[in-house]
Image: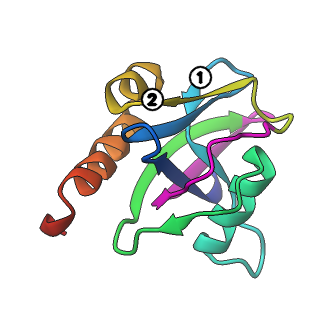
Amino acid sequence: MIEERSAGVILFNKAEGIQFLVLKYPSGHWDFVKGNIEEGEGEEETVKRELFEETGINNLEIHQGFNEKAEYNYYKKNNKVHKIVSYYLAETNQKQVKLSFEHLEYKWSDYEDSMKLITFENSKEILKKGNEIINNPTKN
């Protein structure tokens, strides 16, 4: 089995209440920005690079202490791949998104709408944890 490591970000802004950025992938699912960690790159570097490549956003503040992992398997060219994604929580004051070719559309949406949009349960669980930290910062 092939092992693959990625890093992703639960990005939010507080311009109009707390809103999360979710992206629609060509396969039809909604999820967060994420991408493979390149050789010699740390997870936070990957998050910043992928966020800029996929959305044009380069202004973010990563919340230290939040690093949630999601693991799943998928098939790539008839090979089973075990993927581990490390998710970070980050805030931005940028709302304008310049989508890359990797996505069909994006939405800034509140917690409830984001939970409805996001396709995969593991991503919903990570969003739930991130939302708790944003709303209860003293508990962490």
Q: Which residue is drawn at 13% across and 65% down?
A: 139
Find residue 96 and report its image quarter: top right
- From the top left corner, tell me how far across and down residue 71 is, in percent: 46, 49
Task: Specify few, some or many for label 2: CA neighbours under 10 Å numbering under 14, 14-19, or 20 or more.
Answer: few
- Please say whether residue 98 is visible from this viewpoint: yes
Question: Is 66 included in the stretch rendered in magenta?
Answer: no
Q: Could you tell whether 55 is left or right of 74 in the image?
A: right
Q: Which mark is residue 83?
A: none
Q: Foreground: 38 or 133?
A: 133
For the C terminus, the image quarter is: bottom left
Q: Could you tell whether 85 is left or right of 95 in the image?
A: left
- From the top left corner, tell me how far across and down residue 72 is, in percent: 49, 43
- From the top left corner, tell me how far across and down residue 70 is, in percent: 44, 50
Question: Is 78 included in the stretch rendered in magenta?
Answer: yes
Q: Where is 50 relative to 74, above or below?
A: below
Total number of numbered discs in the rendering: 2
Q: Where is 128 relative to 1, above or below?
A: above
Q: Foreground: 26 or 91?
A: 91
| Amino acid at pointer 1 | His
Q: Name the residue under label 1.
A: 29
Find residue 125 and report its image quarter: top left
- From the top left corner, tell me how far across and down residue 53 is, in percent: 80, 52
Q: Name the residue under label 2.
A: 120
Task: Specify few, some or many for label 1: CA neighbours under 10 Å numbering under 14, 14-19, or 20 or more.
Answer: few
Magenta residues span 76-99
- The reply to whether callout 1 and callout 2 are in contact (CB within 8 Å) is yes
Find residue 30 and report its image quarter: top right
Q: Which residue is drawn at 67% across and 73% down?
A: 45
| Amino acid at pointer 2 | Phe
Q: Where is 115 relative to 68, above or below?
A: above
